[in-house]
Image (cartoon, coloured by chain):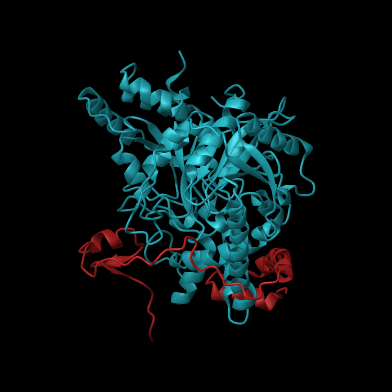
Chain colours: A cyan, B red
Amino acid sequence: MTALNELTLAEARDGLKEKRFSAREIAQAHLDAIEKARALNAYIVATPDRALKMAEVSDEKIAKGEARPLEGLPLGIKDLFATQGVHTTAGSKILEGFEPHYESNVSTQLWRDGAVMLGKLNLDEFAMGSSNETSAYGKTISPWRRNGSDAAIVPGGSSGGSAAAVAAHLCLGATATDTGGSIRQPAAFTGTVGIKPTYGRCSRWGIIAYASSLDQAGPIARTVQDCAILLGSMAGHDPRDTTSVDRAVPDFEAAVTRGVKGLTIGIPKEYRVEGMPEEILRLWDQGAEWLKAAGATIKEISLPHTQYALPAYYIVAPAEASSNLARYDGVRYGLRVPGKDIAGMYENTRAAGFGREVKRRIMIGTYVLSAGYYDAYYVRAQKIRTLIKRDFERAYADGVDAILTPATPSAAFGLGEMASADPVQMYLNDVFTVTVNMAGLPGIAVPAGLDSQGLPLGLQLIGRPFDEETLFAAAQVVEEAAGRMKLPAAWWA
Amino acid sequence: MSVDEKTVRRIAHLARIAVTDEEVGPLQGELNAILAFVEQLGAVDVTGIEPMTSVTPMRMKKREDVVNDGGRASDIVANAPDTEDNYFLVPKVVE
């Protein structure tokens, strides 16, 4: 029999319903796996007592025939979501000791539906990073390794803890957030599935803000179906987030098996960037072939402003971050370092509490918003955002239902391999994912194969606004054709 | 555009982040690398283009003008480094 923590979320749900095992047993199996996987550093904090208590309630509900949609399913929560009474850090020293007295909307909905919390997952500090190396609570290590090598590989970021935990069977699924690719890039690096829904689909209430016009929550899980199940519980209107959209949440799970017959899939020529590995180009072509074989029409399209998305992002996101992170001033929560006056206290607190990457982005944001530069940088970037969105609108108006691209320009890299590069080299990881955030569209990353070194590679599908259903249907075709990714032996346990 | 050391110090002060003399040089290099990268946006013709202000076109939601929350001062100050009688304590601001 498969170990309980190696089941898919859908299999676990059905097994619990049929009483083949209890919620307590599956929670315990995960807690044991987490204990053995300390070397991966995927969890900042595990919450075993809470998990077992929630599992007990689930077992009672199941016994009474009152099981809720996610009853007894153990999940990990990215440590960017406020969880009541549980240390919430955003991966930053500046929030050391912060225990919110409230619960994020997304996690509230997961508990409402019966899910069980295993703990809080590691991330890049304030979700700023592509390798999970900027966390103040240590780097997360990917469960994947290159063939014949024991060198540590990054899980991607910023949702690196979420992706590593899902890949290593330390939870059935996890919450994550995506501002420039932080769900899809780590999913691609770890052979897992991750969807960033349309901006407005999930409430941002109770999620520690990075760049508010780009931030969006979504799930990472081991299958497309599991992601569809989780998103169904995470999504929905919340009056406390003014950008949360008041529209019905579709039955995402039902859309998974819909197929792609009759759909038109666009292949944007601008995503063939220079220096991209041959393997990724081949995989991309292969993905198009799979969709074609399943009945879709493949069409080359043009998204002419693609190359400007990443530089525009590095104006918009830091600008919003510099404003959002102004709240960490040593007064209301977290760290305080004394100074000679109140300004000195602010400056010393923020100098000690923020890591290098966060300071860099706050300072870039401060600069582009400062007097004399606002129009040249920020307003221009927002205009370019309009052009990027228009590119997509034209493609969709021309009859394209979804767009297929590689998820990342390379497979996962080794820990520390990017340390000497200038920050822009690291930013290039998000070159294929960031366009989607700039335009507010939904995007899913789905594993499609392994590279010559044995590391996973993913494809991305981009959809029309609020049409996550088509993404689930198309991603399912890719998943079935590629086969589930098989992790190398559990070297960490 | 690029920033000099003086500008780095000015930005750090505006951002309320203390920087040491040793940090200024590397920060200057990193900020200039990012600024050089975004320079390419100057090549785009944005004449007549509206800046994006709302990701999803929607009417601003307004809630009913009623008290729907409150009376939770102790929750709000619970995580503060220094408090007294549900007030945040800070160093003296006025002389």
Image quadrant where one finds the N terminus of chain A: top left
For the point 38% across and 87% down, which residue is it?
B95
Across and down, in percent, residue A134 comes to: 58, 50
Residue that protrudes farthest toward the bottom in the picture: B95
For the point 71% across and 31% down, which residue is it?
A451
Q: Is residue B71 above or below residue A149?
A: below
Q: State whether residue A356 appears in this view.
A: no
For the point 53% across and 29% down, which residue is it?
A168
Say how many tags the image has: 0
For the point 22% across and 22% down, which residue is it?
A63
Across and down, in percent, residue A199 comes to: 47, 54
Nearer to me, A282 or A161:
A282
Q: Is residue A467 left or right of residue A284?
A: left
Nearer to me, A221 or A55:
A221
Residue that protrudes farthest toward the top in the picture: A1
Across and down, in percent, residue A271 comes to: 71, 49
Nearer to me, A60 or A126:
A60
Nearer to me, A406 or B17:
A406
Image-quadrant location for residue B2:
bottom right
Q: State whether residue A476 appears in this view.
A: yes
Across and down, in percent, residue A429 comes to: 66, 49
Q: Is residue A148 above or below residue A233?
A: above
